[in-house]
Amino acid sequence: MAAALCVLAAAALLHAPSARAADPQAYRVDIASTGNRVFDSTLKATSQLEALRKTVPASPFALIARARGDIDRLKTVVESFGYYEGSVAITINGQALDEPSLGDTLSALPKGKDAQCNVTFILGPLYRIGRIEIDGSVPDFARGELALASGAPAVAADILAAGARLLTTLENNGFAFTKVDAPVAYLDPVSRVLNLSFHVVTGSRVQIGEIQFEGLKRVHERLVRRRLLLHTGEPYSAIAIEKARKDLLTLGVFDAVSIRLADAPDPQGRVGVTFQMRERLRHAVSVNAGYSSDLGGSAGVTWTDRNVRGNAEQLVLSASVLNLGGTATTGLGYDTSAKYIIPDFAHRDQQLQFAVGAIKQSLQAYDQTAATSGVTLSRKLSSEWSASVGISAVHETIIQESITHVYTLFALPLGVLYDSTGLTSPLIDPTHGQRASLSIAPTLSRGQPNATFYVTQASIAEYLDLHRIFRTDPGRSVLAVRALAANAFGASQLDEVINGQEVRVPDLPPDQRFYAGGSGTVRGYRYQSVGLQFPDGNPVGATAMSAFNLEYRQRIAADWGAAFFADAGETSESLSPLAGILHSRRCSSSEPLEGTAPAQSTSTCWAVGVGVGARYYTSIGPLRLDIAVPTYRRPNDDHFEVYIGLGEAF
């Protein structure tokens, strides 16, 4: 007996909308559990009683009709999981749907009284896969891709996926015109098995033929051909074509790239490939804003030319206003920059960036006015690794503790990045994988005093998906862990007289020193406030910094989420994070942070902040609201800090 193909296609169920009633009847739904979490989730997602309960009101008789429609829908799901003799029963207030008095019973319910819908199942015996046949000529290497075994449960999703795997394997091995029909299923009620037959037409093996492009306007075709991962004469592979399509999108100048194949191979056994492109708007304007209680508000605008000369060069101009209020700031600031980016410079996946900028900051630690410039060459080494090298120059005036310093800095920054999260934007919420970075910047400082030092920073973050532990859907329960460490090798300490008191400070420019506190290190403490302080309570800065962050992120419903976190960090004269954990102490409420009395103290004392957060997930990343408190407070510390921004803290 041939089973209807719809039995195997549970995923294609259509939800027809119900009419909106004049006198809606509120109701509750109880769907009995089958003991299988995936099975239960599919049943719940298929039920219109459940899906439309809150969004589409129903009159008493429309409710009965909705329940009757659910019987066939849920029966299809039951069969798709291999229970071909199963049945579905639905009652409303204990009455069967065909009970003549059910409509009157519902109409007589008092106002505000919910009707109770109960859905139960009699599953019957589980059918299993019997014979598996392939009708057609298929290479031996592809037959095993079905990955079906006689005796396995006859689950529709597994059977349909098997046919899709077979088609994909053949298309990735040169058979461009393969057809794999939907499997034909034969029920054997006596043996309680489902016999399967896959009809396959492979056609001939082909190669990539002529490659053409449609839709190019300003973008030069030579750029696209130079970038293309696909070449005429290569064996045909659907996955290679898809990889080439996605790679073209990374140029940033196309809204969409699609593929069209020739209808048949040419006499040489090659199939033509046409890439159909739709270019993005050349110019774009974006705005940004953020707020934290320590740094205050910020707002900015960015103008981008995505394709300056037709080769995907980018010109990015941005300007932001900083320090709009905030407990760690003393006045308004600004940050302006211009960047010119040349992609595929001298090598594929290698870009050259020129940048100039101007920045002004008025912070408790120091006031800074600076002009910056730099050139950076970065290269993508693989899907996970990238590296960069550059040269930068900064001329700045810094006022700290009423003393004005003028510096000129020259640096040679080197960096390596690792990212296995598989995400295209750092703003998107990572749910698995790692991110790590290491940078070293040999720096020559000309100022008061002159110095040569090596600024080294390292970080590693791990994202653990806990869905197996909490039995949630993948990506909804995530534990994020990060460690940070930084050190300025070659720096030394100087004894300076500040406001009549001798204070030990690093010989680094204040903006090159390390600070902890704020959204990037230890939430709950003001920006730069953790560590040594001058007698007036302003931050000194240090030559080393360590921080650890632990955050649990839980999605709630479709677009909302919550976070719970703990941060810890310290600054010191030398980097020893492990020694600090093992041998130092955490500051308590009865003792000041290191350096508050006296300022030259170098004892190790870890600052710890804890907090909670809310998330609203958008297509470009989560909107974040975090509230954090210090586990101990000095007299000049805030009771709590608030952080609002786009993207996770790390």
Image (tube, rainbow, N blue to C red):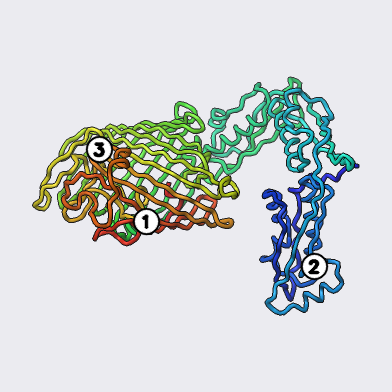
Mark 3 touches mark 2? (CB < 8 Å): no
Amino acid type indicated by mark 3: Ser
SS label for mark 3: loop
Q: CA distance from mark 2 to mark 1?
A: 56 Å
**Seen in the image, is 546 located left or right of residue 12?**
left
Quickly name the residue at label 1. Answer: 298
> Which residue shows up at 47% across the image and 50% down it?
552
> Which-is-in-front pick, marks 2 and 1?
2
Of the numbered discs in the image, which one, if any, rests on residue 574?
A: 3
Which mark, residue 64? 2
Residue 421 is at least partly visible in this image: yes
Q: Is residue 488 left or right of residue 307?
A: left
User: Along the line of sight, which residue is nearer the eye, 212 or 93?
Assistant: 93
Q: Earlier in the sequence, mark 3 or mark 2?
A: 2
Classify the position of the N terminus by image quarter: top right
Q: Amino acid at mark 2?
A: Ile
Instruction: Where is residue 449? Give x, y as percent.
Output: 15, 38
